């Protein structure tokens, strides 16, 4: 393992709702249920009467116009916000703290701490659960090998490419041990070539995990490639406008999937729904 100078003696601790219900590798399974959900910021109505069910182990993509409330919906699911109306349950739990204990939220920006090495950034969730630095690194190391990060354990974030930083952030998300992953535009900041490569990588990673996933993206093709089902949201206030299932099994090579005639046909239907929802 490459090493760098050690982190400051007193490391920050990231608030993540406390320990998940089980340790990494011994996960419970949890689904997500959203019923009649409404949310306002003052007079601004962001979400209106939204219903959404995500089965245990299912991957669901949320696509909609910019500013329609997609990120707010993830925050509501995670228990970071309280809904103005309706209900949200994760693993049958409606209490916000219990929802947060079951959800790992990966925001658009990787939020890696620049003074920590890659492996120490990834292991922050384990440190927050009380693991010592050596033990946390030991638990994180197999995921670095699995996700193509071997040799970069000691690198600082500024020494990593955008795609590698996103991989480190994803490892950190997995190490939280939560059964529900909430991914908010994880590849928004990447160039087109890197984004396509990361989509294929993430498809394989999620197929191996078996967790419940809600993915927010502006990219219809990305959503259909990565997810079992895609929900199209209309412009603010967000409300489900259409639902489509990907016709191609997950984790197949991207180049084969996105050029398949059935996939292209579903993508066009999704784009038409998105255009309708933007009017």
Image (tube, rainbow, N blue to C red):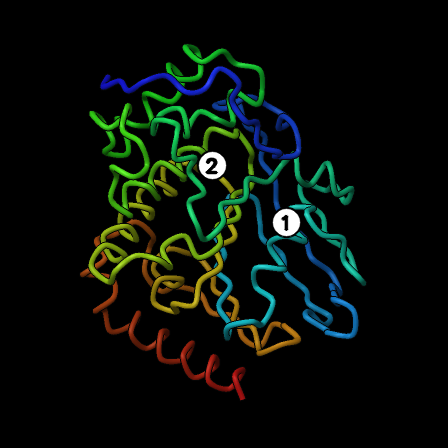
Q: Around disc 1, counting alpha carbons within 10 Å, would you say few (fewer than 14), some (14 to 19), or many (20 or more)? A: many
Q: Identify the residue at horizontal 72%, vertical 42% (top origin).
A: 92
Left/right placement of residue 19 relative to residue 151 reads right
* Residue 76 as seen in the image, left or right of residue 210: right
Q: Classify 255 as above or below 124.
A: below
Image coordinates for residue 202, horizontal then vertical, percent: 33, 46
Could you give the CA–CA distance between mark 2 and mark 1, rounded to whole angstroms? 18 Å
Which picture quadrant has residue 49? bottom right
Specify the quadrant that holds the N terminus.
Answer: top left
Report the residue at 77% width, 45% height from top.
94
Secondary element type, mark 1 = strand
The answer to which image quadrant residue 73 occupies is bottom right
Left/right of residue 252 with respect to residue 8 in the rendered view: left
* Eye-nearest disc, 2 or 1: 2
Look at mark 2 in the image and give the residue it sits on. 173
The residue nearer to you, when weighing 112 against 261, is 112
**Secondary structure of the residue carrying numbered label 2:** helix
Q: Which mark is residue 32?
A: 1
Q: Earlier in the sequence, mark 2 or mark 1?
A: 1
Q: Residues within 10 Å of mark 2 (few under 14, many from 20)?
A: many
Image location of residue 249, percent across then percent down: 33, 55
Q: Position of residue 161 (x, y in %)?
A: 24, 44
At horizontal 58% and vertical 49% (from top left) the residue drawn is 55
* Residue 91 image-quadrant placement: top right
Q: Considering depth in this image, is 216 or 250 the residue closer to the camera?
A: 216
């Amino acid at each position: 393992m490459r090493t760098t100078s050690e982190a400051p003696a007193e490391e920050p601790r990231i608030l993540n709702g406390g320990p998940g219900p089980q340790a990494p590798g011994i996960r419970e399974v949890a689904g997500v249920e959203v019923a009649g959900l409404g949310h306002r910021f003052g007079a601004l109505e962001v979400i209106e009467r939204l219903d959404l069910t995500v089965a245990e182990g299912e991957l669901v993509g949320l696509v909609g116009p910019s500013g329609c409330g997609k990120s707010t919906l993830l925050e509501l699911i995670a228990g970071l916000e309280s809904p103005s109306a309706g209900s949200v349950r994760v693993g049958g739990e409606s209490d916000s703290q219990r929802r947060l204990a079951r959800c790992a939220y990966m925001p658009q920006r990787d939020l890696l701490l620049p003074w920590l090495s890659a492996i120490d950034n990834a292991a922050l969730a384990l440190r927050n659960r009380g693991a010592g630095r050596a033990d946390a690194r030991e638990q994180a190391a197999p995921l670095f090998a699995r996700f193509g990060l071997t040799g970069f354990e000691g690198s600082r974030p500024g020494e990593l490419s955008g795609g590698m930083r996103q991989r480190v952030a994803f490892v950190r998300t997995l190490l939280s041990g939560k059964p529900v992953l909430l991914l908010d535009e994880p590849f928004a900041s990447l160039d087109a070539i890197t984004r396509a490569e990361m989509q294929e990588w993430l498809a394989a990673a999620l197929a191996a995990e078996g967790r419940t996933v809600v993915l927010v993206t502006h990219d219809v093709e990305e959503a259909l490639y990565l997810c079992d089902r895609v929900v199209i949201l209309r412009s603010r206030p967000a409300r489900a406008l259409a639902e489509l299932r990907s016709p191609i099994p997950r984790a197949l090579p991207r180049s084969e999937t996105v050029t398949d005639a059935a996939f292209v046909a579903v993508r066009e239907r999704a784009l038409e729904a998105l255009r309708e929802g933007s009017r």
